[in-house]
Amino acid sequence: MGGEEPQTKDDPQNPLGTVRRVEASDEMTPFEAATYFFHRSADRLNVRDEVRAVLSTSYRELAVQIPVKYEDGSIHVHRGYRVQHNGARGPYKGGIRYADTVDMDEVRALAALMTWKNALIDVPYGGAKGGVHCDPTAMSHPEKERLTRRFTAMISYIIGVNRDIPAPDMGTDAQTMAWMMDEYGRKMGYTPGIVTGKPVELGGSPGREEATGRGVVLCTQEAAKRAGMSFRGAAIAIQGFGNVGYWTAALAQEAGAKVVAVSDVRGGIYNANGLDIDTVLKHSGDAGSVQGYHDAEDVSNQELLEVRCDILIPAAIHGVIHSENAGHIKAKLMVEAANGPTTPAADEILTDRGVTVVPDILANTGGVTVSYFEWVQNIQQFRWELDQVNRELEKRMSRATTQVFERATANNTTLRDAAFDIGVDRVRSAAEVRGYV
Ligand code: GLU
């Protein structure tokens, strides 16, 4: 293809996200990057054009206005989104993000990644994502509650226990899910299965909060073993200290690794001898950032990616590893806990340099996997014990990880290509057998 103008974000002429096929670069929007990896896989799998047209665009996209009254009496009109990418394998499923980067393109990309992720980890869901453009760190508790309730009411027409099930993502948490469930229930009656990642006392699953981090660690241990590297004692740098970053750090330390660097939006800290994660957490709670921790030197988020370590785990936002820094990464193994942290251009550089990259759609599936267990418990009104949750999570993570490594070896591809091939192939055949295309 080529020769056309690049699609712009929130392009009204392009409501469902058709993107032209482009060369790998840093300039791609998140959706262009996600679609780039999809098309490479569709080429390898010889996906028919009609099927490709369905799988490379969203099924449904909803954009809503959310007027919110702030404490000072002013009214801000936020923009919210819910994108359902593909539902061939089951109800749409994916988190809700509150961040000032949110726009239709970002949500659309994240929805597509959920489709491939859910297929790869083999939970019976399609892919979706939602988001609200806002700065949750600058909002009070009641402001966030008003925003969440209004947003829930606005998207209530297209969500449902058997239709589309939201969950937390960046900037949202169990409290956000409690408000969503409550707001939805006001109209529809008690419906715990409408969202996952709820507080345990409202029907949330034990183990859901730490599930993404637990899955990242399980996957990292397996990848280290296959790379002939010992996980115990390995130096790990983690970008991000939110839910995913913190739990990854805490559980990696518990499993014997040495976490040498962590960071948050303000910046990071580094100590070659290792950090004590719970003390760092306490410091960051008091100081508002990990920076300034007594037993480490402050580094920038940029420096964190390039520190000397064995394993690098980006666990913050998309696009942080690009062609400018991919050549400076010292780690031999990189595990993507964030969604879309590596640009397609950086991905090529890392592959050429022989860095093993465990892709997002495998590494961070622990969250949605335990979301699935939560939904199952809600539907059956039957509570599982924590050890059952963790056992089932481990089983699924290890199965998917083995499948990805084996496919990559058999077809001589990267792990990302193998993961996309498995996910895309499963969605393709579900869509075809349903008679969807
Ligand atoms: N937001 C998480 C993700 O990106 C979890 C989604 C879910 O549990 O539905 O995978």
Image: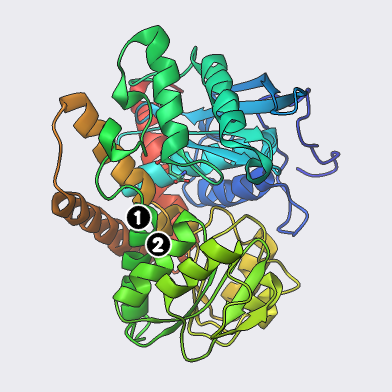
Label number found at residue 52: none
Q: Residue at x 37, y 48 (%)?
A: 367
Quarter of the image holding residue 351?
Answer: bottom right
Q: Quadrant of ligand 1?
A: top left
- Whether 66 is drawn above or below 140: the answer is above
Decide: few, some or many residues near mark 1? Use Cα within 10 Å; few <14, some 14-19, many ≥20.
many
Horizontally, residue 266 falls left or right of residue 379, namely right
The kind of residue on which mark 1 rests is Glu
Label number found at residue 247: 2
Toward the viewer: 299 or 50?
Answer: 299
Q: Residue furthest bottom?
A: 273
Q: Residue at x 13, y 31 (%)?
A: 382
- Whether 293 is drawn above or below 397: the answer is below
The kind of residue on which mark 2 rests is Trp
| Pointers 2 and 1 in contact (C-beta within 8 Å) | yes
The colour scheme is rainbow
Mark-to-mark CA distance, 2 and 1:
6 Å
State the image coordinates of residue 304 (x, y, percent, origin top left). Answer: 63, 76
State the image coordinates of residue 273 (x, y, percent, origin top left). Answer: 47, 91
- Whether 239 is drawn above or below 62: the answer is below
As helix, strand or loop, the secondary structure at mark 2 comes to helix
Q: Residue at x 14, y 42 (%)?
A: 384
State the image coordinates of residue 232 (x, y, percent, origin top left). Answer: 32, 85
Toward the viewer: 80 or 200?
Answer: 200
Q: Which residue is mark 1?
A: 210
State the image coordinates of residue 72 (x, y, percent, origin top left). Answer: 75, 28
